[in-house]
Amino acid sequence: GQQRDFELQIQEFIVAIVNVFILLLGISIIFSLIVSNWLTSPLRLLKQKVDSLKIASENQQIDYAGSDEIGLIVKAYNQKIGELQEASIQLAKNERESAWREMAKQVAHEIKNPLTPMKLSIQHLLRNLENGHPQTLEQVQKALPSLIEQIDGLAAMANEFAQFAKLPDPQFEPLDLKNLVE
């Protein structure tokens, strides 16, 4: 009998230890899930912000007060956001300058084109005048209207370019497309 009681007590003790162990295991699993969720939530926020990064738009910095490893990552992210915005502004400025440079080059080319034949015509007429060429008056009467026409074309081009440079900023307003289409 005593042996049997002793075995029953040992068996109950082992069952109690197993139950306590299972309870502690359950508590530790729940605790580790809570802690891991708490630890990874800033990383999920960081991943979400990195996924939503866009080059040409306003990116939001992350507010994170901690100074742990995640805080260092967030600080680096926020610093890179600032650098990205500066680079985006510089890129837009460079594109505008490049467009203006290209336009100026094109306008200069358009101005130079008629100037060369105009200069050659005037030099030819002067040479004929100096040499006393008999048909110089005829040539002058032929060349001057053409020269005036080319000068007027250049003046018109200069005026158009000046008007373009003075264009006001566009004024956007709502538009009823249905009425426009009808």
Image (spheres, helix red, strand yellow):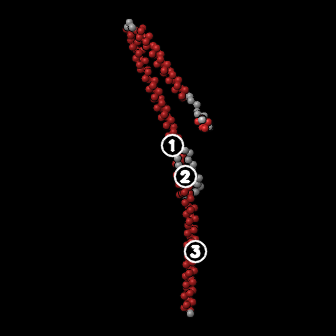
Residue 3 x, y percent position in the rendering: 54, 91
Q: CA distance from mark 2 to mark 1?
A: 19 Å
Locate the N terminus by quadrant: bottom right
> In the rendered structure, which disc, 3 or 1, sits on the residue that comes first in sequence?
3
Q: Which residue is mark 2?
A: 49
> In the rendered structure, which disc, 2 or 1, sits on the residue that comes first in sequence?
2
Q: Which residue is mark 1?
A: 87
Q: Nearer the viewer, mark 3 or mark 1?
A: 3
Q: What is the secondary structure assignment of the residue under circle 2?
A: helix
Q: CA distance from mark 3 to mark 1?
A: 56 Å
Other-residue count near label 1 (Cα within 10 Å), few / some / many at <14 / 14–19 / ≥20:
some
Residue 158 x, y percent position in the rendering: 51, 23
Q: Which residue is mark 3?
A: 23
Residue 133 x, y percent position in the rendering: 37, 8
Q: Amino acid at mark 3?
A: Leu
At 58% from the left edge and 57% from the top edge, which residue is drawn?
Answer: 66
Q: What is the secondary structure assignment of the residue under circle 1?
A: helix
At 49% from the left edge and 32% from the top edge, which residue is drawn?
Answer: 100
At 55% from the left edge and 78% from the top edge, which residue is drawn?
Answer: 18
Q: Amino acid at mark 1?
A: Ala
> In the rendered structure, which disc, 3 or 2, sits on the residue that comes first in sequence?
3
Q: CA distance from mark 3 to mark 2?
A: 39 Å
